[in-house]
Amino acid sequence: MSQEALTEWKPKASLNLITIAVMLATFVEVLNTSIANVALKYIAGSFSISNDESLWIVTIFLIACSVLLPATDWCCVKFGRKNFFLFCIALFGISATVCGLAPNFEIMIIGRIFQGLGGGCLIPLSQAILLESYPKQDQPKAMAIFSSGITIAPIIGPIIGGWLTTNLSWNYVFFISLPFCIAAFIMVAMYIEDPPYIQANPVKKFDSLGMIFLIIWIASFQVMVDNGQKNGWFDSEYIRNLGITSFFAFIALIWHELRTKNPLLDLTIFKNWNFTIGTIILTLLFGVAYGTIAILPQFLQNLLGYDSFLSGLAAGPMGIGSVMAVVFTSATLKFLGLRTQTVIGLVVFSIGCLMFSGLNLNIAFNNVVVPNIVVGFGLTAVIIPCTTLLYAMVQKQEMTNASSIQNLIKNVGCAVGTSSVGFLVSSYSQIYQSYLVDRLSLLNHSFATQIHAISSNLMGIANSEGVANIMAQVKIYKTLIQQSTLCAFINAYRIYAVLIVLLLPFVFMLKKFEFKEN
């Protein structure tokens, strides 16, 4: 078969059926990146472990998701993409069931490892299949559907997880994956096929050394970012060692992949300008997005006293914004173009972050709805056109490798973005505390007046004026802690807004792809 015939291949099944099949797999994998978070304290209680130990349930899953991801292309050639896809879905579903039935913490961790190994490859496989199946002029439509799945799933994950944990038990957080996996397995078996260019590719020798370097890099990096905040980051020898290990493993991986004949990661894809710039934009975007998704529940729970279900529910309106963005990008593509849409999305996302910087301790639940809709709109309005431009000049036979690399780098950005929340809030809280505590002096007339007023009100429950005075100071100090933490959250949102604005010049570095832009 000629190269042109290979490239012009089209699937036999309906695009709608193919889309449903792969999106079921994508949705359930992304859902599991966040759904278990709200159940950790309940799982810790069941297994009699500490809250810190329960965090391994999330950490080990994220590590496992990234480990097999770069080997996706090799596995597709070796075993057939359809067979490998089915294997990953089955492994994910069975492992999720094992986690739900786990009698102890050790079995839970083993189940999460295999769940991550199966789930990590589902996103690049789904993305590659969608992009290959849709003709070039319809790829924005494919990316709109795909983007909806990867943005809405982590938003509703905490809501579903909170409801299941509260009304049933934490076990159902894992059992809910099973019906999705069964449906996805059946539909993939019926409607997905291997394109001829995958069947025609020779099976290369597996890059085992590259895989070793990759595992060391991903594992040390993920553990570092997950544990950095509570250990004082690089003030801790433990974190420094992890950082050094991660850095040298990464350098060794890149050096090896550029020199070996059969690399695990074909880095020549970075010669594609749009792929490189697009990956930079999406990695930073997802880093900030995961930061905003993580920071809002912390604000609502720590400062406003929301429970896990309500704090998860507060993020729900982001899904409304995402749906609105899908409609917007579809309707405006013909006269705006992909680059203009990306710029609009970044600006709207930045505005949403700035709206959140107006938070205060007296806001009602409704006050977080509009900013969440704006953030959800901006996020999806960037992902759809930017992803389309990123893959526009990638050949079909390169799609699986390109998708694997892009999603691996994106995962790194998400890990950094999530960990940035703890770092920013902790750092700025300390700065504002040191600034505000200078005002807590009886030489400050306002402070002395406030102390007198509060202590007078507390005289009824205090044994003496001295006790009432101490109680008043404690109350004011608690308010200081709240206000300094609030200022830290506000600053974090402002930083996120600035980072998004800094991405704007990169958009104009993307080459236009003409199919319906003009």
Image (tube, rainbow, N blue to C red):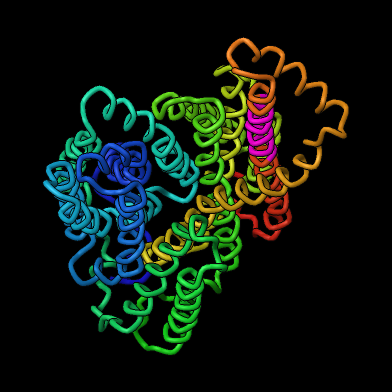
Where, by quadrant of the figure, is residue 197 drawn?
bottom left
482 drawn magenta:
yes
Depth check, front residue: 344 or 500: 500
Quadrant the N terminus occupies: bottom left
Where does the magenta region start and end? 472-487
Left or right of 298 on screen, residue 83: left
Left or right of 245 on screen, residue 10: left
Q: Residue at x 64, y 38 (%)?
A: 485
Please tell me how many numbered marks the rendered image carries: 0
Where, by quadrant of the figure, is residue 491 drawn?
top right
55 drawn magenta:
no
In the image, residue 117 sits, relative to residue 212, either above or below, namely above
Q: Residue at x 32, y 79 (%)?
A: 212
Residue 163 position, x and y percent, is: 31, 25
Residue 397 position, x and y percent, is: 37, 67
* Overall secondary structure of the magenta section: helix
Residue 82 in view (yes/no)? no
Residue 256 position, x and y percent, is: 42, 86
Residue 30 position, x and y percent, is: 36, 45
Left or right of 430 on screen, residue 81: left
In the image, residue 34 sits, relative to residue 473, either above or below, namely below
Residue furthest front as drawn: 464
In the image, residue 193 sits, relative to residue 25, either above or below, namely below
Where, by quadrant of the figure, is residue 62 drawn?
bottom left
In the image, residue 153 sits, relative to residue 253, either above or below, namely above
Q: Residue at x 34, y 64 (%)?
A: 69
Depth check, front residue: 485 or 255: 485
Q: Residue at x 46, y 47 (%)?
A: 139
Depth check, front residue: 371 or 479: 479
Residue 104 in view (yes/no)? yes
